[in-house]
Amino acid sequence: MHSSNLIFDRNSVGTRALHCVSGLALSAAIAMVSITLGDLPWLQSHGLSALIVAILLGILLGNTIYPRIAVYCGPGVSFSKQTLLRAGIVLYGFRLTFHDVAHVGTAGVVIDALVLTSTFALALLLGQKVLGLDRHTSVLIGAGSAICGAAAVMATEPVVKARAEQVTVAVSTVVVFGTLAIVVYPLLYQWNLNWHLLPADMSGFGIYIGSTVHEVAQVLAAARSISPQAADSAVIAKLVRVMMLAPFLLALSVWMRRNAAHDGDDGKASRVTIPWFAFAFLLIVGLNTVMPLSADFHRDATAIDTWLLTMSMAALGLTTHLSAIRRAGLKPLILAALLFGWLVAGGALINCAVTTLAA
């Protein structure tokens, strides 16, 4: 009896390991295709990174083929969506240094902080109080709009413990309005040559783009169509905004706990969920700042990071059901549209006010 139980346990462990490997292989295969497609000039010019391609391919497979094989791949797909995501966020720190802060100056940091806090606060107000959305969806859309698009949505998910379809709805809004920003901001720059309502110099307009556009890839696409100088300042402002992800996640965890306690949910309010991976991300940024790391190391670390994040986005798509997105309705899109309007108009006001006061 003991021997048969031992054999059963071994077989069970082996089966779980096989399912984990098969799920990782599936996520990696989608990531490989997505990274290849993400290198196409047309997709790059439209700000559609490998991350976005991966979630779209994942959704396609997740609503056609994957349900038939989910029982064989589920553990590996879950591992990709959760553990590989955290590892990818940590390695993202090798793209940044604290010297980036100096390039945009105090004014740039203040602008980023004001845009982040005002956009997220507006998401909570409009999402829950006006549109009647659930808290998780409002938080995810707010994080994606306020910080760094899909990566911020994915990094926020472990803190709020949202469902896959809520995460996908939030990521979808980043795709829609981040892509729209690629067209809108160059037009704003041309109009501003006559209006003079926004920062007129290339560097100032680049900071405006970097502080208000969703994704890093979308920031690059919008700013490059203006000038290389605008692109440089836009990317630096955007990366400073990305560095605010870690303190944002900790503050969000504390806020979620207090709200759970206020709502009388003692189970959820028992402890603060500390996003350790976010602090590891800051540690890597610090390491990248103080230690001379070779160009080859940075290239390899960035490549690994891209793989990990793309695999996690593919896994998210695989576990997303379109029927759940349809049930979410138009309200998430309306919220994202209102936040996009605030990023364009309110972000312009913040940039002008801070720049004027700092002068």
Image (cartoon, rainbow, N blue to C red):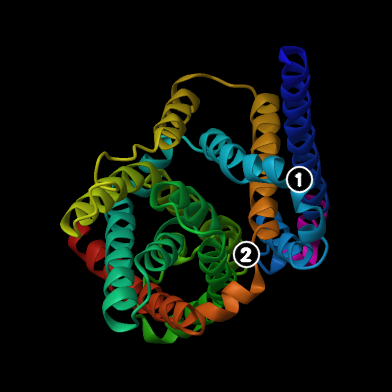
Residue 27 appears in the rendering: no
Q: Main secondary structure of the magenta part?
A: helix
Find disc 1 in the rendering and name its residue.
Answer: 73
Q: Nearer the viewer, residue 233 or 128?
A: 128
Instruction: Give the residue at the far top of this rendering.
Output: 3
Q: In the figure, is residue 78 to the left or right of 23?
A: left
| Element marked by disc 1 | helix
Residue 223 x, y percent position in the rendering? 56, 64
- Extreme residue in the front direction: 1
Q: Which residues are magenta?
A: 35-43
* Image coords of residue 110 (percent x, y): 26, 54
Q: What SS does tag 2 mark?
A: helix
Tell me which amino acid carries mark 2. Ala
The residues tagged by marks 1 and 2 sit, at their Cα atoms, a distance apart of 36 Å
Image quadrant assignment for residue 260: bottom left
Residue 349 lies left or right of residue 74; in this view the side is: left
Let me know if residue 155 is in the magenta part: no
* Residue for point 44% across, 21% down: 290
Q: Which residue is mark 2?
A: 221
Q: Is residue 132 left or right of residue 69?
A: left
- The residue lying at 51 percent from left, 83 percent from top is 329
Task: Identify the image quadrant of the C terminus.
Answer: bottom left
Q: Is residue 103 above or below residue 349?
A: above
**In this orientation, which residue lies closer to the viewer: 75 or 341?**
75
- Pair 1/2: label in front: 1
Mark 2: give few (<14), some (14-19) or many (20+) Cα within 10 Å. Answer: many
